């Protein structure tokens, strides 16, 4: 077959591809849109629609009972003088900046241990993943409040060691720490992702490093961490977003008050109080959009910073 004949065949193929779709192709396209229709309806009615409504309500004075009254930027300027709001920012940022790194470190270290080829790996992987499924539930939050209570399991263990315990969830100095521990305990999801990433690292790198005399610690910092940076970045972004949205644990542990002394007053919990306790839905909607902007800013910063520490194969 000559080169000219090949070019003619390629041109005919392109013409056929750019021609009008056949009846079978159109039928398949309609079937695809039909299957996508429930998702599209859900996206419009359950996500985009409420978002647009909340954006409108953020510029209004609305108490859920009367017609919204347009007040412009008053809800946003009001935030500048809201001391409890400022405190909730501080509590939330402390929670995010402490819990997320500790959770990722615990997940990564445990993934490295499980990657050694333990017997019954599937069993251990399931057991360690279980807290991620249950950690955000009301039942676990109630259990956590009991464990760190005055007569809880933690104080009972300390009593055996001759140490006098305290009400960990009832003290402003330690209440937030108990929520951090609960967040770190739910390391299962990032651990599974880390474990999958570790399985993708070629063993020849470790074999070559062993021949050169590199120990396990040096292999971890010179091989494992650099090749795992895309996975670390992925987990970091997801956990940052999730930590900013934490609500259930603080609500249950503090009985919805954010106490003691607003020490567990997460931003989302204060938003809930303003919207559904004080019926100030306009202000709560404005708070929700501020939270959206904050999460978006952190995500953008993470993506920009990733250029300096995330290494891809290419």
Image (cartoon, rainbow, N blue to C red):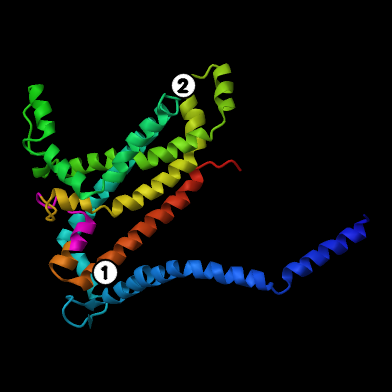
Distance (Cα) linking label 2 and label 1: 51 Å
Residue 307 falls inside the magenta stretch:
no
Identify the residue shown where x is 23% and y is 80%. Answer: 71
Q: Position of residue 133 (x, y in %)?
A: 31, 45
Query: What residue range appears in magenta?
Result: 260-272
For label 1, the crowd category at 10 Å Cα-Cα, with few meaning under 14, some 14 to 19 and many 20 or more, is many
Image height of 108 relative to 285, above or below:
above
| On-image quarter of the N terminus | bottom right
- For marks 2 and 1, the one nearer the N-term is 2
- Could you classify mark 2 by the number of other residues whose Cα lies within 10 Å: few (under 14), some (14-19), or many (20 or more)? some
Q: Which residue is mark 2?
A: 216
From the viewer's perspective, is 79 left or right of 308? left
119, 211: nearer the viewer:
119
Name the secondary structure under disc 1. helix
In the displayed structure, would residue 265 be above or below residue 156? below
Residue at the spot of label 1: 286
- Picture coordinates of residue 127 (x, y %)? 33, 34
Q: Nearer the viewer, residue 302 or 284?
A: 284
Horizontally, residue 36 falls left or right of residue 67, namely right
Residue 94 pos. (x, y %): 25, 47
| Residue drawn at (29%, 40%) of the image | 131
Q: Residue at x 48, y 37 (%)?
A: 197
Q: Picture quarter containing residue 187?
A: top left
**Residue 167 disc label:** none
Name the residue rendered at 16%, 78% in the picture. Answer: 65
Work out which quarter of the rendered image holds the C terminus and state it. Answer: top right
């Amino acid at each position: 077959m000559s080169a000219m004949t090949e070019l003619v065949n390629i041109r005919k193929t392109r013409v056929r591809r750019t021609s009008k779709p056949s009846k079978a192709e159109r039928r398949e396209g309609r079937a695809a849109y039909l299957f996508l229709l429930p998702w599209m309806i859900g996206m419009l009615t359950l996500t985009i629609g409420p978002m647009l409504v909340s954006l409108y309500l953020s510029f209004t004075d609305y108490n859920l009972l009367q017609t919204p009254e347009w007040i412009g930027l008053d809800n946003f300027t009001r935030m500048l003088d809201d001391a409890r709001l400022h405190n909730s920012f501080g509590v939330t940022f402390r929670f995010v900046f402490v819990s997320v790194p500790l959770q990722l470190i615990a997940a990564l270290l445990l993934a490295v241990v499980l990657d050694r080829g333990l017997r019954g790996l599937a069993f251990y992987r399931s057991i360690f993943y279980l807290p991620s499924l249950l950690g955000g539930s009301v039942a676990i939050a109630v259990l956590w409040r009991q464990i760190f209570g005055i007569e809880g399991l933690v104080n009972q263990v300390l009593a055996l060691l001759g140490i006098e315990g305290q009400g960990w969830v009832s003290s402003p100095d330690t209440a937030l720490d108990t929520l951090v521990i609960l967040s770190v305990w739910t390391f299962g999801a990032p651990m599974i992702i880390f474990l999958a990433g570790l399985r993708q690292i070629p063993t020849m790198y470790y074999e070559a490093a062993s021949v050169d005399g590199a120990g396990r610690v040096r292999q971890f910092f010179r091989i494992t961490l650099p090749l795992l940076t895309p996975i670390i970045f992925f987990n970091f972004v997801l956990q940052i977003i999730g930590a900013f949205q934490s609500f259930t644990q603080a609500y249950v542990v503090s009985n919805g008050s954010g106490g003691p002394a607003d020490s567990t007053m997460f931003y989302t919990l204060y938003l809930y109080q303003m919207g559904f306790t004080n019926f100030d839905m306009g202000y709560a909607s404005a708070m929700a959009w501020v939270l959206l902007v904050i999460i978006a800013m952190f995500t953008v910063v993470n993506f920009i910073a990733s250029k300096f520490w995330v290494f891809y194969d290419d």
